[in-house]
Amino acid sequence: MLSIRNLTGTGIGPIALKLAGGEVAAITGPSGAGKSLLLRAIADLDPNDGEIMLDGEERLKMSAPSWRAQVAYVASETSWWAERVGDHFEDKRAATQLLEQVGLGESALDWSIPRVSTGEKQRLGLARSLMGKPRVLLLDEPTSALDAANRELVEQLLTGRLGEGTSIIIVTHDPEQAKRLKAKRYHLEAGLLEATP
């Protein structure tokens, strides 16, 4: 269970949200509403206040790396620090399995980062985040640059993780995606989050 109370940060809050294992919260809202800021605050990447707990354990009592290993943030534009894709994955066998699930495959490990497209980076970033088996995924428009076939692969992967008990907060502009993931729906505007039917 991810429990958020009175979360405030730059341009957001106060925000409250509860999400059990295997549940999805889909967040929509206009550009500039604070959707990415909310995910970054939950991941403790930006200054924020409030109470966030994961299965009864307070975020404040965990180190930042420990928290982010369990509550993984995947930005809409992922960052890469090494020249080759494979340099970002320690376990090549596990990486290959994930990459195949998102329509890439083992050969992607040999690609140089400059030749990777935006959509490929989105799928690679998701695979990279899943390597640590996080309990919560914070996804910022993870399929915005994908065609329908690859979007379906990503959604199948996410559905599988939900079945294993992972919780997901996904920012999306696609109401059909929220339906496909059987998500609880929320709308964020002017930094405030409200449940929607």
Image (cartoon, rainbow, N blue to C red):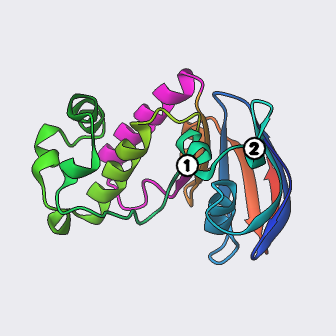
**Residue hosting label 1:** 65
User: Circles 2 and 1: CB distance less than 8 Å?
Assistant: no
Q: Which quarter of the rendering shows the N terminus?
A: top right
Query: x and y percent of residue 43 in the render?
Result: 63, 54
Q: Residue at x 65, y 78 (%)?
A: 32
Would residue 78 appear left or right of 48 to someone viewing this image?
left
Q: Is residue 91 above or below residue 48?
A: above
Q: Looking at numbered disc 1 in the image, what kind of residue is underneath it? A: Pro
Say whether residue 146 is magenta.
Answer: yes
61 or 118, nearer to the observer:
61
Q: Looking at numbered disc 2 in the image, what kind of residue is underneath it? A: Lys
30 or 115, nearer to the observer:
115
Q: Which image quarter: residue 188?
A: bottom right
Query: x and y percent of residue 13 in the render?
Result: 83, 66
Q: Is residue 24 above or below residue 138?
A: above
Q: Which residues are magenta?
A: 139-165
Please rate how many residues cluster around mark 1, counting C-alpha atoms within 10 Å: few if below 14, some from 14 to 19, many from 20.
Answer: few
Would residue 15 appear left or right of 165 to someone viewing this image?
right
Say whether residue 140 is magenta.
Answer: yes
Please rate how many residues cluster around mark 2, counting C-alpha atoms within 10 Å: few if below 14, some from 14 to 19, many from 20.
Answer: few
Q: Which image quarter: residue 122?
A: bottom left
C-alpha span from label 2 to label 1: 12 Å
Q: Which mark is residue 61?
A: 2
